[in-house]
Image: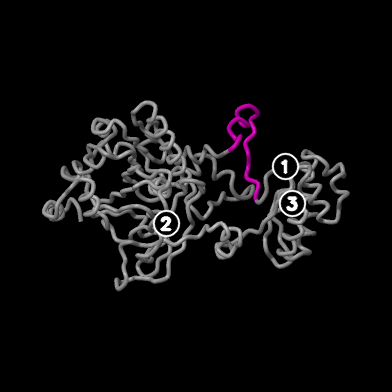
Amino acid sequence: MTSHSDTAEPPPGALDGLRVLELGTLIAGPYCGRLLGDMGADVVKIEAPDRPDPLRDWGQAEGGHQYFWTVHARNKRCVNLDLRTDAGREIFLDLAADADVIVESFRPGTLERWGVGYEVLRERNPRVVLARISGYGQDGPYAARPGYASVAEGISGLRHLNGFPGQAPPRIALSLGDSLAGMFAFQGVLAALFARERTGRGQIVDAALSEAALAIQESTVPDYHKTGHVRQPSGTRLDRVAPSNLYRSADGVWVIIAANQDTLFARLAAAMGRPELAADPRYATHTARGDNQDELDELIGAWAASLTAADLVAVLNEFEVVTGPVNTVAEVMADPQFNARGLFVDHVDPSVRPGDPGYDPEPVKGVGVIPRLSETAGGVRWGGPSRPGTHTDEVLTELLGYDADRLAALRAAGTIS
């Protein structure tokens, strides 16, 4: 983790002036909050004094700093506040009175048990948008169940589509269902804010991990509904979409070649020195290539294995065939395209200063803000503070006008820390 007082502050983003209270833990809720913060919102992350976000302990660590946390808590002010106490609940409601958005990712009913459900929030602030992220949604027979990304990917059918036929369906080495739910919640928040401009009222955004994983599955539902077809895992390719696969080069690098359109396949055939393949009845059309997918993969695989990855990608790019290597993160960070776009940016921990334990003068790199806006681009103003409650005094003083005596009394009572 780093700290640099001279890091340039990015200009105001598209959501500058928007205030967000984030109550979520782990990935989906914090990811939604991160996306809002990336675009310029003032995100105040609230953690219980005795139970900080478990995300603080995830990922690779060095010198006491968790780099998973660095990214997902960036651009947020971290406050310790116990909502299970009367005093903590009233402080939260006072903060909510001027908030635009509240993000939570607890099991349905948790806010209601604490006395800060949507009806209470709406009474204090009719304009507030409440984003509720859960495993299965706020109602239905599974609503009360705990939900993780792995199970959401499974129950939605997404995991069934991954891997090779006849083998156990693997997971990608990410919590994909969480990130998808966070993205859909972010999208819903923006839509609700847009609607508020017309109605003057906030509303609930109900995002579920399981539904987010289902929503990206293209035509699997209508395919089954109308034809009874159950899409199956297809390994490294899409069934009957050819050629679109990865092939190993002479130096052992996996390279993706996607030329399943007729015009693209003609260019691939020319790149291979086999232009006649484009007119061959076995490969001339999309349907024919699908019928002869295995044979076509063997032809392309043999050709790809005769070239190094660099030469293979070069010749395919020369003929304007869609291609690219399967990169590791090390290769991604060295890639000229990503670097030309300035995609890797510094993350600065505001809670660690020169002389503090764990201070690192070398900035921590992370992925910048995506997408890029031409007029009101977002930015990384700071990385996630490694110390819980870093901004508690600042936020309560700035937003609610608390003085030192009141803060000391709250701290002594354990409401804040």
Q: CA distance from mark 1 to mark 3?
A: 19 Å
Residue 166 counted in the magenta span: no
Q: Are marks 1 and 3 in contact (CB under 8 Å)?
A: no
Q: Which residue is mark 2?
A: 71
Q: Which residue is drawn at the image coordinates 79% and 59% (left, top)? A: 302
Q: Secondary structure at mark 1?
A: loop
The mark found on residue 240 in the picture is: 1
Question: Measured from the top left, where is residue 308 in percent x and y?
Answer: 73, 66
* Residue at the limit of the structure toward the bottom, as seen here: 355
- Left-right relation of 290 to 114: right
Q: Residues within 10 Å of mark 1 (few under 14, many from 20)?
A: some
Q: Are marks 1 and 2 in contact (CB under 8 Å)?
A: no
- Pick the front one: 29 or 8: 8
* Disc 2 element: helix
Q: Which residue is mark 3?
A: 321
Q: Earlier in the sequence, mark 1 or mark 2?
A: 2
Figure disc tally: 3
The reply, left or right, for residue 329 in relation to residue 106 is: right
Q: Is residue 224 magenta?
A: yes
Question: In this rendering, is residue 354 above or below 342?
Answer: below
Residue 9 image offset from top left, x and y in percent: 39, 57
- Nearer to us in this view, 286 or 350: 350
Q: Circle 3 sits in a helix, a strand or a loop, which is it?
A: loop
Q: Position of residue 341 (x, y in %)?
A: 56, 56
Q: Earlier in the sequence, mark 2 or mark 3?
A: 2
Task: Say what amino acid the circle numbered 3 marks.
Answer: Val
| Front tag of 1 and 3 | 3
Kind of residue sitting beneath label 2: Val
What span is colored magenta in the figure? Answer: 218-235
